[in-house]
Image (cartoon, helix red, strand yellow):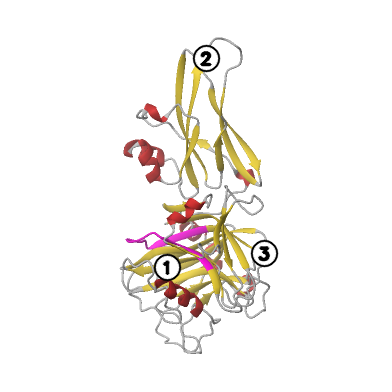
Amino acid sequence: MRRWLRVSFLAGLAMGFTCVPQDPQAPYPVLVTAQTRADSKALAELQKPGVVLFSDGFDSEDSFKSYYEVGGLKEGRAKIVTDPAIVRTGKGALQLTAVANGGNSSGASAYYWFGPDGHDRVHIRYSIKFAADYDQGNLNHTGGGLAGVAGTDKWRAMGGAGIKPKGDDHFNSRLEAWRDWGRFAPPGYLFCYSYWMDMRIDKDGNYWGNMLGPAEEERFVPERGRWYCMELMVKANTVGKADGELAAWIDGKLALHYTGFRWRSTDAVKLKRASLAVYVHEARRDNTVWYDDFVVSTGYIGPVKAASEVSIRALKPPSEPLDPTLGGGAEVKVLDTAAELRRLVGPKVGAELARQVDFATERVLFVSWGSSGPPFGTLQHELKKEDQTSVIEFYVKEPSGTGARGQAWRMGAEFYAAPRNLRTRFRS
């Protein structure tokens, strides 16, 4: 039943939104992108970092374990690909395909749950590439989305297309593209397709998602066959006030910003669900999209850095000694969150190290290494570019000369902060 609800939800999002006269007392969001860009303080507040809740580079099939539902996985419509010509960063990317279905609907998706408590403000950041031949015809729902729900039901409101939320149940928004009945080249211009308690009714009597886009002169059509970095932010309103927000960035530039939302009528409705999807209403051919560099955070994340901007920095050693068994190896462990860091080194040392890291844009590299001596070798690293991605390679540089060694063994353990899109390895 839940799977049927999910499909019917998507299938119901069929019409381009055309509003009819509404209740003049109901607040409606206002586009303020230009004002925010011109106000450095407002822009800084909007782009204030938060706490990273989740990140995924789709480097292996293990990624799927983090998502409570992956539509199309068994049928091969959702898969991890490792072709360097496709992947943006790391070892893999998520490939989602809406296969040809004789003009009926088709899609694939991945849903991530960060409830049950939820948050009042959440950002998602992801890289996306439309296939060079992507052409949905007219209607599709392809992109990253956020949903606020009440309660603990992960599938709540996934069957509510055409129905206005009441305020105490749910709200959602997705950053996607629309061709406007063929007026724009595929995949169409980007906007936010949104459901909330004050949304406006369509002329056909249904409450299809309202289309909240940029100023008409700023409509942006992504080029097919190349990567873009997208970020979507939803900030829930204070109950009883219309102070909620919606914003989106393209390659680090603010593309749209709306204020004045009443997303909800109760604090029980919080942001708890994120998704990546491809969905085509009338699938007459295969349409594929790729995702990479997925991050969920309570604050601004920012774009994936170019290879020329990549660097790492050593963290200040902790004030307390580490467990000596952590050193002496020949490996790099990647720690994406402060929680993972604490599990490795304990709560006190973990907190000390975590304070030096911006987990919205960085991850921790723990390098375990060893060398015989004296004299002992030293840990070195080298930045390389392979398959259009950056790789940091650690190795032990042994001392020159042929003097006797092997009287002792030095066990080293060092920590670095590195960009999230950086691949790592240890040269043995």
First along the sequence among labels 2 and 1: 1
Which residue corresponds to the image point at 61% horizontal and 59% vertical from the top-left?
A: 228
Residue 59: tell me if it is visible.
yes
Left or right for 208, reference 130: left
Disc 2 to disc 1, C-alpha distance: 58 Å
Nearest to the observer: residue 42 or residue 126: 126
**Secondary structure mostly taken by the magenta-highlighted segment of the chain:** strand
- Classify 10 Å Cα crowding around label 1: few (below 14), some (14-19), many (20 and above): many
The quarter of the picture where residue 184 lies is: bottom right
Badge 2 density bin: few <14, some 14–19, many ≥20, Cα 10 Å: some
Q: Residue 250's x, y, as percent? A: 58, 61
Looking at the rendered image, the quarter that the N terminus falls into is bottom left
Question: For numbered disc 3, what is the local secondary structure?
Answer: loop
Q: Amino acid at mark 2?
A: Pro
Residue range highlighted in magenta: 108-125
Q: Nearer the viewer, residue 224 or 171?
A: 224
Residue 119 among those drawn in magenta: yes
In primary-sequence order, the first of circles 1 and 3 is 1
Residue 312 pos. (x, y %)? 54, 38
